[in-house]
Amino acid sequence: MDRLARIVGVGAGVALAIGLWMGLVQAPPDAVQGEVQRIMYVHVPSILTAYLAFTVVLVASIAYLVRGSRHWDRLAHASAEVGVVFTGITLVTGSVWGKPTWGVWWTWDARLTGTAVLFLIYVGYLMLRSVVDDRDRAGRYAAVIGILGFLNVIFTHMAVEWFRTLHQPSSLARGTIDSALYVPLMVNLGAFVLLYSYFMLRRVRLGALEEAVEEEVLR
Amino acid sequence: MGHDGTGGVSLRVRGLSKAFRGAWALRGVDLDLGPGETLVLFGPNGSGKTTLLKILATLLRPTRGTGTLGGADLLQEREHVRRRVGLVSHGSYLYDDLTPRENLAFAAALHGDRTSGQAVTAAMERLGLVGVADERVRTLSSGMKRRVTLARLLVHPVDLWLLDEPYTNLDQEATKVFEGILQEHQASGGLVVMATHNFLDGFKQATRIGILARGRLMVDEPRASLTFPAFQELYTLRAEGGER
Amino acid sequence: MSFRALAVEILRKDLRIEVRSREGINTLLFFSVLLVFLFRFAVGSTEIQIRQAAPGLLWLAFILTGLWGMTRIFQVERENDCLELLRLAPGDLGGLYLGKVLIGCCLMWAAELAILAMFGLFFHLDMLPVIGSLIPILVLGTVGFVAIGTLFAAITAHLKAREVLLPLLLFPLMVPILLAAGRLTHLALSGESLMAEAHWLRLLIGFDVVFLVLGYLTFPFVMED
């Protein structure tokens, strides 16, 4: 397990180095926004990885409620933590991107608002966990949030999208993105997913160790 | 009054243990209780009596161990176990703004019995509650409230009575009534697990004596094998002397 | 006991208690009136400003009042350990959830009608002609709020941090309702037909269905142990 983590970690580091070089140095700057647009290479993979993380939380939460095995709970907890971190990165990079582009640090456009709500929901998830003493009960309560939160985000995105948008429409979805930008983006995305996996492997292991220590004290 | 349908179920528990954040509240408890038997548990505060009762009531999930009540598994078939169990605990389980009649009818309805007007009236008569049947529980004395709580045991037939300090707040007359319904329940094959600090009365009602200390069942003997003084000595030795 | 029967028993029991003690409804009404009072002073004095802000303020008032209402739902059980009594019921605990959602909705609707009346009074808005459009919005929006609120109230019922945690968990999930119901209320108050932006209605209906079902399914897990 530790070996796997180390391999993934190294892989993530390498991929990230390559990807960031490609994005921040090699790729051409945007015709309109200039160099600032390069932040996309961090911002977009970040939110996509966050979505991956919260999907894992959803699946692990359902599995924990149905099966009850501690493994699922550890997985959910770890993925929520990592997901919150990546969401935070998304918000910060989004804000940094926005300042020179739109002139303000924060706007209430659809994407950013949806991401902020996402952040709040899963921070709530983590806070709930920290407040409940009983580990199994905390896991069950958190699983409920993990499930409801995920579905809620879908509704939130729909609602916020309908309401207003300043954000540029998703270039990825529309497929008009220049191949020169597409490749570095994909490389960075891959790097972020590897990074996620590395954090997960470490965090889940840490969670298992914490629980083992508690078990020992019981003896 | 009909406590039928109990048809002799048994309680079997093996290795029941419960840990709360880093400490064992209950360790390796084994029990065997047959129809008509009454296990009375004694032990100092914090010895695990309430925890054990709550686990048997399926309110708590044990950390380790297994158990069955009348064949229904304590862990896997909790709903079936709940159907057979009546719990009287520290809380009154009564809604202050409802009358005894309404509280009892609600309790019966929760247990699936909605045509229970008769059972409720009979239970109230048995516990001497007819006079206050339609007054809000808020206005009753704690002794009367305790009677209503006990009456819950009669409004729907259950096999196992779990009683946590049932003698609290009962005056002499109410104590007599309580022991009366207890004995009727025993006679019809019902099981009882009772935790109490009331040494004398508890001892008298028991068919088995149990002593819990620090989560372990130190003593589990048929009452017939002990005299009261012998029991008192045993208690002092095992519960308070405290060997692990 | 079937979940429907259990839900009805819970509703009847809670209605009886609310009618008798009037604790819940009194506090709710007083609180909501107070809130509207404060809004009146917080918002500017121009009629136009108020009219524009009204839909959002209305739903803000509903949700803030609702926060207290959701705490109330299990308050009756917190006294005298009655939550344990309910957990001992050998029936489908999802029925308990539905019963509590029903009583929650009853309390909320009573408060919402009072708030509507206050709004009409304080802000000189004529609600009556458009009441036909307002009612469905009130119903749909409230059900969604109560569906999630009841579940979270059960989760936080025994926590010391309950007062902070309930809004912290609940409010981010209310964004779709606030947006949809706010928009629809704006249409209604402007005298327009709701069907002009029917997608908001569909969103609310979908929201309600999804979270009622989720609540029903996950509530037993929240209650156990």
Image (tube, rainbow, N blue to C red):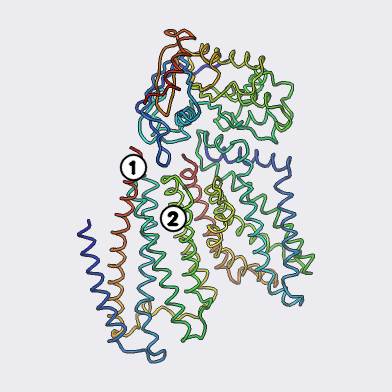
**Badge 2 density bin: few <14, some 14–19, many ≥20, Cα 10 Å:** many
Q: Which residue corresponds to the image point at 49% horizontal and 51% vertical from the top-left?
A: A131
Q: Which residue corresponds to the image point at 39% horizontal and 85% vertical from the top-left?
A: A37
Closer to the chain start, of discs 1 and 2, is: 2
Q: CA distance from mark 1 to mark 2?
A: 28 Å
The N terminus of chain B - image quarter: top right
Looking at the image, the residue that sits furthest to the bottom is A31
Name the residue nearer the viewer: C33 or B145: B145
Could you say where residue C150 lies in the image, as x and y percent from the top left?
57, 50
Mark 2: amino acid:
Ile
Looking at the image, the residue that sits furthest to the front is B241
- The total of numbered circles placed on residues is 2
**Label 2 element class:** helix
Which quarter of the picture shows residue A183? bottom left
Could you say where residue A94 lies in the image, as x and y percent from the top left?
44, 77
Name the residue carrying label 1.
Answer: A215
The C terminus of chain B - image quarter: top left
Determine whether, in the image, residue A143 is placed left or right of residue C177: left
Name the residue carrying label 2.
Answer: A147
